Amino acid sequence: MGVLTSFLFILAVTFLSILCFSCQQPGDGGGGTGALSYIGSYSNANIDGADSVTVSPAGNHVYVDAYVANAVAWFNRDSLTGINEYY
């Protein structure tokens, strides 16, 4: 087959940020190394006190629960590239 791509979302609570990385995983005969590649980040007071990150079942949205901001931040997500767009 090919190389499978997974995504990793990390909350940097002190910096009010969410970071996105891709990970190329070996598939059936694929050449993925498992190395992480930085894709991008989002930083804003809207995610102050971020506590959790959830990807929707379809993979096209990411939600960040932010208890200090008393909010849930919503991102559109491209399930192929992992790029997030804040709304």
Image (cartoon, grey):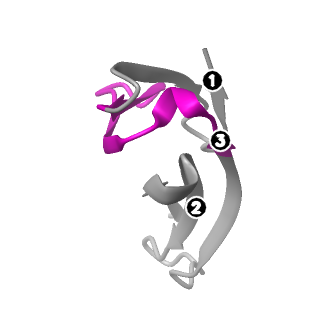
Asked if the stretch drawn in magenta spans residue 58, the answer is yes
Q: Which circle marks residue 52 in the picture?
A: none
State the CA–CA distance, disc 1 to disc 2: 18 Å
Determine which residue is flagged by label 3.
42
Mark nearer the N terminus (3 vs 1): 3
Mark nearer the N terminus (3 vs 2): 2
The magenta segment: 42-67
**SS class of the residue under badge 2?**
strand
Residue shown at the point (32%, 31%) measured from the top left: 65
- What is the three-letter code of the residue carrying label 1? Tyr
Residue shown at the point (71%, 52%) measured from the top left: 40
- What is the three-letter code of the residue carrying label 3? Tyr
Q: Position of residue 61 (x, y in %)?
A: 46, 24
Determine which residue is flagged by label 2.
22
The crowd level at tag 3 (other Cα within 10 Å; few <14, some 14-19, many 20+) is some
Nearer to the camera, 45 or 73: 45
Question: Mark 1 or mark 2, which is nearer to you?
Answer: 1
Question: Do labels 3 and 1 touch, CB within 8 Å?
Answer: yes
